[in-house]
């Protein structure tokens, strides 16, 4: 018979201890993994659980421009008018270097704060034919529509360069009598034969540029010296035709016709000055839109439904509007809420 030595017993004891330690460590790892999985599952449950919103009553204001509730004009009767679908900005802009440079120069002067206000405005109401109240977020702003619209028409004339729609001047307007009228107004009275001579020379100048004016700006002048069409810079809007004589005079006198870039800038400047909102220059408000309808449309309606929507589309208002106080914050709605809450 052979008996195991004492050394073998010691080795068995050590192997048993190692097995016990391994089993204990495995159990600890299992417990750790189970706790980790439970904690991750609980955290996922917490993250997936809906968070309770904290409502601040003074910030709960209407900012939906499609919702008429809250507008001042919603309480007055307006004609039911159907606008044609507003065309998108021409995707293919002019490839002329001069036009590209003019657009770049104008965009570089953009005031981002005013652009955000006008680009996301909610119409509140018109103070008169000059000022309109707009809401942006919780701010209420007083805006000078004629000055802002001038820059809008300038940029839009450059954007739609050589691809403008047009509307007919019916009946065609003879240019020479209109120029004579503008000259007499500038001269302060009847200038006699001298006025007729200047008017005829200016008419010949515009006739010599008629092909370029028609191709790039949709200003169609017939060979007989009659204005047959004008550009529709913003769809459904007709400029104040009472300012047409002054426009023709400045177009013939104040534009540099000899250099390309200054020429295009000058024409766009004169178009913008002519097309901007001019409250006292509209002969008949029924002609302020190009849609065929018999209703007499107010200028305030045109501001709300034609000019203000154009502010939201591809418009870079220059920083000069800030200096001219054309966009002024008159109230913060959260402060008004606190005031009324005390009453």
Image: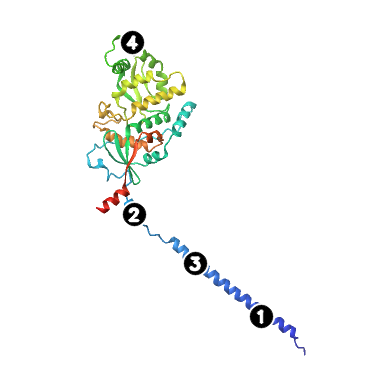
Q: Indicate which disc, 2 or 1, sits on the residue closer to the N terminus.
A: 1
Q: Residues within 10 Å of mark 4 (few under 14, many from 20)?
A: few
- In the picture as drawn, the residue positioned furthest to the bottom comes out as 1
Image point 46% across, 24% down: which residue?
261
Residue 39 is tagged as: 3
On the image, numbered disc 4 is attached to which residue?
197
Q: Indicate which disc, 4 or 3, sits on the residue closer to the N terminus.
A: 3
Instruction: Give x and y (percent) for residue 127.
Output: 26, 37
Instruction: Give x and y (percent) for residue 21.
Output: 63, 76
Q: Nearer the viewer, residue 330 or 90?
A: 330
Secondary structure at badge 4 equals helix
Secondary structure at badge 3 equals helix
Q: Residues within 10 Å of mark 1 (few under 14, many from 20)?
A: few
Discs 1/4, front: 4
Discs 4/2, front: 2
Disc 4 from disc 2: Cα separation: 71 Å
Q: Are marks 1 and 4 in contact (CB under 8 Å)?
A: no
Instruction: Give x and y (percent) for residue 135.
Output: 32, 43
Q: Indicate which disc, 1 or 4, sits on the residue closer to the N terminus.
A: 1
Image point 47% across, 62% down: which residue?
44
Identify the image's colour scheme: rainbow, by chain, secondary structure or one colour.
rainbow
Q: Are marks 2 and 1 in contact (CB under 8 Å)?
A: no
Disc 1 from disc 4: Cα separation: 124 Å
Disc 4 from disc 3: Cα separation: 94 Å
Q: Are marks 3 and 1 in contact (CB under 8 Å)?
A: no
Instruction: Give x and y (percent) for residue 139.
Output: 34, 44
């Amino acid at each position: 018979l052979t008996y195991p030595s004492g050394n073998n017993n010691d080795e068995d004891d050590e192997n048993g201890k190692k097995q016990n330690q391994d089993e204990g460590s495995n159990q600890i790892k299992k417990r750790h993994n189970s706790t980790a999985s439970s904690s991750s599952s609980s955290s996922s449950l917490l993250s997936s659980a809906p968070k309770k919103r904290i409502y601040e009553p003074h910030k709960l204001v209407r900012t939906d421009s499609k919702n008429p509730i809250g507008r001042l004009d919603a309480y007055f009767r307006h004609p039911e008018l159907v606008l044609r679908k507003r065309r998108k900005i021409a995707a293919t802009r002019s490839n002329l270097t001069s036009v590209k440079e003019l657009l770049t120069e104008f965009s570089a002067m953009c005031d981002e704060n005013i652009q955000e206000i006008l680009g996301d405005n909610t119409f509140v109401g018109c103070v008169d034919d000059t000022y309109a109240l707009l809401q942006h977020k919780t701010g209420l702003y007083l805006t000078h529509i004629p000055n802002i619209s001038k820059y809008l028409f300038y940029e839009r004339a450059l954007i739609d360069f050589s691809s403008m729609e047009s509307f007919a001047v019916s009946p065609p307007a003879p240019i020479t009598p209109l120029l004579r009228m503008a000259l007499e107004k500038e001269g302060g009275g009847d200038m006699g034969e001298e006025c007729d001579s200047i008017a005829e020379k200016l008419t010949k100048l515009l006739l010599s540029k008629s092909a370029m004016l028609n191709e790039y700006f949709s200003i169609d002048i017939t060979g007989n010296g009659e204005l047959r069409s004008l550009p529709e810079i913003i769809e459904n809007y007709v400029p104040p035709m009472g300012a047409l004589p002054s426009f023709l005079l400045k177009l013939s006198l104040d534009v540099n016709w000899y250099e390309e870039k200054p020429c295009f800038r000058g024409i766009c400047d004169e178009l913008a000055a002519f097309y901007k909102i001019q409250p006292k220059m509209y002969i008949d408000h029924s002609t302020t839109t190009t849609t065929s309808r018999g209703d007499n449309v107010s200028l305030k309606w045109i501001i709300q439904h034609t000019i203000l929507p154009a502010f939201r589309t591809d418009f870079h208002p220059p920083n000069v509007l800030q200096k001219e106080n054309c966009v002024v914050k008159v109230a913060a709605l959260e402060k008004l809420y606190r005031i009324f809450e005390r009453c």
